[in-house]
Image: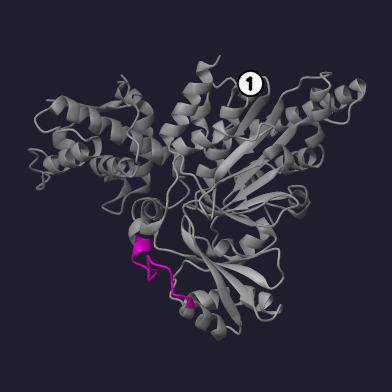
Amino acid sequence: MAKVYTSASDEEIIKRIQNKGLGLRTSTSTPKWPILRLALTRSLKFSTPPDEGLDRRDSIGSEYSFEQLTGQDNKAQPEDFTDLFCALLSVYHNENLFGDDERYAKYLQRHIRRGLREFATSWRESHDFHEYLYQELLSDLRQSAQTISDKPLDQSSIESALRDIGVQAEIRQIQEGARLTRYRLYLADVNDRDRLNKGLQKLGFILGLGNQGALSSGTDESRTMNLDIPRSSEAWQRFSGAELRTWLQNRNSEWRLPVYPGVDVMGDPFDFDLAEAPHLLVGGTTGSGKSVTLHALLISLLHSCSPADLQVCLIDPKRVEFNSYQGIPHLYANQVVTNAGDAAEILGHLVAEMGIREEQLVKAGVRDIDEARRSHRLNLPRIVIFVEEMADLVMQNEEIESLLVRLAQKARSAGIHLVLATQRPDAETFSGLLRSNIPSRIALTVQKASESRIILDDHGAELLLGRGDMLVRLIGQPIKRVHGVYVTIDDIALAVKTVKGRT
């Protein structure tokens, strides 16, 4: 009989989930088969098929029969889901798998292993696994159950709701965006700008938007504003990692570190030069799309910059988020750092590297790395430091914050840039000194307006739609709303394979 095989790392994530328990029985007796079925379900949420590399067997992994996985001929499980699973995979892969147990088992294995790998990447053991499943597997059902309409609200309803919050406005343009409808408002009184901003939550309640709020943004005209009203998630236009690769082919050739976090509200690719940022904070709650955003930024850099022009320092206390990038030629110090002690050490090396580069720039008679490269006096690669879950690191080792502050204050001219991510944006872990030296910010969905103000110095992120919806504030520019591109583990694997193949 055909079997499904897992690796040692697969078994490790299964064990971690068993230790948390699934609410079915005590954590010590939670069986493996519900976890494997959940992994299959998670994998089927992806639009792209799993990688063939998941066919490989691992001698120190485990093997599972159909009896265990699907209930086939298993008296302990009265329901047999074999035909159901086979039908799902047949539809997904557009081929008839009935009667071909070997091929069916192969696809089943790929999906289960991909789902387990996704659990390892996106779920943190310190967080509730039930809430994670709810966000990852049921978020579509949750959002579709809300009262948001698939169709734009009519003009009179919007204008009436605005009057209810004390704003007199005329709608002069309606635009259909990727996830929302944008209404361009002409205000009767310039003071209505403040009234509108303060009344957004009440406006969302009047319009029946549920948890998905309305957001406003300014324009070049003082009496004109944009009002963004979300649509049902079924009506969203989605953007995959494959489109990210297409956008990069048309990137601005003058930009040194081009990155694409997603698209603007109208669905057009949104990009910026990270070298101009020059440092970036990315904040958002669990399930908001923060980690996916980091991958979009990182993949953008890997596709557009050679190892001679770019090195990336990856610090990942979650131990799984950046693990897929092991072995890439761009990797600083040839390792992904996974604990606070090593993080402090490598950040100390980077502070020393900053000092060495400053001396080299002075000797070369140039102001910064850009002038050095243009004049061909120095050809130093830029270094981008990605720190996943900065709050955890800072709480474990206080030295890390001071090292990050020193880099944020002085590293730009030396070509060293920071991308700091956190799901706990508070004053304790993101101090005023660090905040004042990280001028560019990306805020994904947060729970409270106070967290939005920590990230953006403004409210609004508490009203976002989740799943990659973000507010981007770049240095010297107004806040812009962006919908994130959805980067899957297969997109990451392809990017890693591509950059390894160049060397």
Residue 86 image position (x, y, % from top left): 16, 38
> Is residue 343 in the magenta section?
no
Q: Is residue 191 left or right of residue 370?
A: left
Identified at 52% across, 24% down, the residue is 326
Please give left or right for residue 364 compared with residue 381 in the image.
Answer: right
Residue 411 visible, this orientation: no
The reply to whether the magenta stretch includes residue 152 is yes
User: The magenta stretch spans which residues?
Assistant: 142-155
- The reply to whether residue 395 is visible in this rendering is yes
Above or below 338: residue 446? below
Tell me the residue at 69%/52% (across/down). Answer: 430
Q: Amino acid at mark 1?
A: Pro
- Where does the image place residue 183, in percent across and percent down from the top left? 54, 68
Judge from the rendering whether residue 218 lies leftward or rightward of residue 411; answer left or right. Answer: left
Q: Is residue 358 above or below residue 488?
A: above
Instruction: Assign the magenta stretch its main secondary structure.
Output: loop
Query: What kind of element bears circle 1?
Result: loop
Residue at the spot of label 1: 307
In percent of width and height, residue 50 lies at 33, 32
Q: Quadrant of the N terminus?
A: top left
**In the rendered image, the vertical position of residue 80 relative to residue 300, given as above or below:** below
